Image (tube, rainbow, N blue to C red):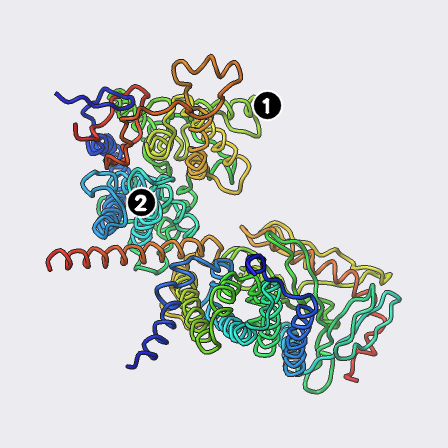
Amino acid sequence: MNAEATLPQTTPAAAMVRTLGLISAICGLIIVAAYQGTYDAVQENKRIAVERAVFKVIPAAKSIAEYVATAAGEVEKLGAGGTVPAGAVKFYAGYDAAGKLAGIAAEGGAKGYADTVRILFAWDPEKAAVTGFGVVSSRETPGIGDKILVDKDFLANFPLEARLAADGQALAHQIRAVKHGSKANPWEVDAIAGATITSRAVGKAINDTAQALLPRIAPHLDKLKEKS
Amino acid sequence: MSQTTVRTWDEFMEGVWRQNPVFVMVLGLCPALAVTVSAVNALSMGLATTFVLTCSCVLVSLLRKLIPKEVRIATYIVIIATFVTVVDYLIQAVSLALYDALGAFIQLIVVNCIILGRAEAHASKNPPFKAMVNALGMSLGFTIGLFALGAVREILGAGKLFGVALFGANFQPWVVMVLPPGGFFVLGMWLLVFAAVARRKQRKLAEVAQNA
Amino acid sequence: MSIEIRSAPHIKGPKSVEQIMRHVVWSLLPICAFYVYQYGLSAMASLVVVTGSCLLAERWFVKTGTQSGDISDYSAVITGLLLALSLPPGFPLWMGAVAGLVAIALGKALFGGIGFNVFNPALVGRAFAQAAFPQAIATYTPSFLPGRFHEMIPSSMALPLMQPADVAAWLKLKQLDALAGATPLAKWKFEGVLAGAEELITSLSGHMAVGPSPALILVCGAYLALRRYMDWRIPAAILGSAALTAWLLFAFDGTRYPNPFFMLFSGGLILGAVYMATDMATSPVTPRGMWVYGALIGILTVVIRYYSGLPEGVMYAILLGNAATPLIEKITQPTPFGKGASSLLGRQKKGASYPLHPGYISREDAGAVTPKKRFLPNKPKKQDREP
């Protein structure tokens, strides 16, 4: 008896497995219930968030459609929750109240001061220019790097020329940020003094995405003109 | 008040004041410093933690006789992770902007030492109601702590509270308050104020005792 | 006659904390007076408000018992004066008050009061102000402006929590270039203009935003060092290492780097080296440690000035030096007499392993107050125990 009492009491393995199984089952049920219960609301929220972001950069837009420009040079419509094929660039076509194309929005990212600055910019096919942009995510220093959204001189950069070269393979002029006050051409971005790195990131983000996207969608603009 | 209500109240106030997780135990600092840039973020983080803490403590307390002691920590973590996942979905469903603002810190609730600590130290030894009262008190204390940090940082860093401008357009924002060091500065100031108030109280009590 | 058994030092001198601090304040007064003469009313208001806020904070924390020390020991006055001298003269008064409060609260009270602080309180306050109000702290105005004794610099009078008035517009009204207000360091960093030697040393030429005169600071510092209220090793080490680093870089590429003379006498290097880095509680006590500490600060200052985005690096260099102080003290402990040989033989390398005298009463047991750190290893010690 004595020896038994001093032994540490151990739970038999079978009981342990049983209990753990039961607890896992309970937890699994709770998670599945939560996922099912919130699925619709989450999807709706995501859609609204995307729409809002696009409407902000294309003020005339009243509805949007999601497209991808594949590596083969095709433009395809993206279904709800669909995945983007490898090598393809996703973009949004914004349509005004009459169903006419108001602008094309795409995301781009480039290394900023603290982390990658991700932006959503709007391209107007008629003006062949980038008309505006919004920040998707950024960790830039508050009060310095985040001036890109409010600095009047910086916002005066837009519309920013983004015209395709004659051969249709790339932009006629590379978009890039230049030192504050030395902007000479409509395709240059006049950087904010004191926030040059963030300004440069915006320029690079627009340039990288535009170089990849615009040559692909230019031949298909007619298809995008009307809301389908 | 009957004996039991007094005891329940004591149990509740334990976490709110005497063992306040932020200001007394100085626990859970990762979310306390990282997401308290604004009062709204701080409150939401507090509410999310309240949900996880209360639910997991009740569940742990209900299952306390079933859980084999050899694997109790693993079991607690599974239970906590479950509720963290639930709260993750709930916040996404309520507001994506809030979800982005809180970032990885929602998922990181799972490693918040306050929750595992409560499950191990209290919920696993007490009946569900008592565990729930204690967990609610603790999480209220945590929420108050986060709010105290978030409110000061939002008022000084942006001149706003809950997004409402308090001082007009000419306000000079304190840049440091919205940066990570601001969290440490404000926490240090709060700890200092708490220490000063506590010392003063002690001194008064000692004087009263001496005079009596 | 009672015999007291205790460890060294056995000779006690009359110097008390209060006396040392009072002498430091006296030596600061001429510097403050010249500063007021340079910048007028605003500088005066800044000195008064910042020092006042330091004293108020000190009083509250001492009264509640959160920190040790005594308000009458003048240490808060030193903190306030140094903080005000290191801020621009037109720094908004409410921001100065905040900086003073933070200096005492976070720099001193949080650690337990005088003697326990890890960082120089004045620099903690300035670092906070630098991080919180980066624009205001970089806005300098030229010295010797006409009418400086009749009107304040408009930014001084900003309402609490509000943005200061635009100093550039005010200067334009006075027909002065806004950049006349840049400090010599900012001018060098952003425009590549070097200021002349005479201007730097005396600050008398005017219309240039130099701080208090380095020559005056050196004279006042020399007084303190001669009276043994300050150890000369630290300023010497800082200035020496900064000059050496700057000279090496200047010799390497004279067009890219300014001459070492400019490095030494621009910005707050002299003020920092003489008055801030020598703070007794936050600098090493061992003589070798002082050299290491000073050299570290000097090199860091030059490196920060050359290679970071900030024009001035003295503040961060000293704060980093403060942080490294315990480590420096640890590696520069002098070997006790008679211990050297055995350590050379490779035995008993670390720690005092000899048993204490059985009758020894530890300082804590005797209820002794931790004394201030000493300036010199053989400097007499303050009376800290009842005989």
Say left or right for B134 vs A28.
Answer: left
- Mark 1 and mark 2: Cα distance apart in space: 47 Å
Which of the two marks, 1 or 2, is nearer to us in this view?
2
User: Could you say which is closer to the camera, residue C375 or residue C141?
Assistant: C375
Is B27 located above or below residue C5 in the figure?
A: below
Q: Residue at x 27, y 58 (%)?
A: B197
Query: Quadrant of residue A108 in the image?
Result: bottom right
Query: In front here: A80 or B203?
Result: B203
Host chain of mark 2? C
Relative to C77, residue C263 above or below: above
**Quadrant location of the C terminus of chain B?**
bottom left
Tell me the number on the disc at residue C252. 1
Residue C130 is situated, as x and y percent measured from the top left of the image, at 42, 47
Between discs 1 and 2, the one toward the N terminus: 2
Q: Residues within 10 Å of mark 1 (few under 14, many from 20)?
A: few
Q: Position of residue B88 (x, y in %)?
A: 60, 72
Q: Position of residue A146 (x, y in %)?
A: 54, 59
Along the line of sight, which residue is nearer the eye, A185 or C365? C365
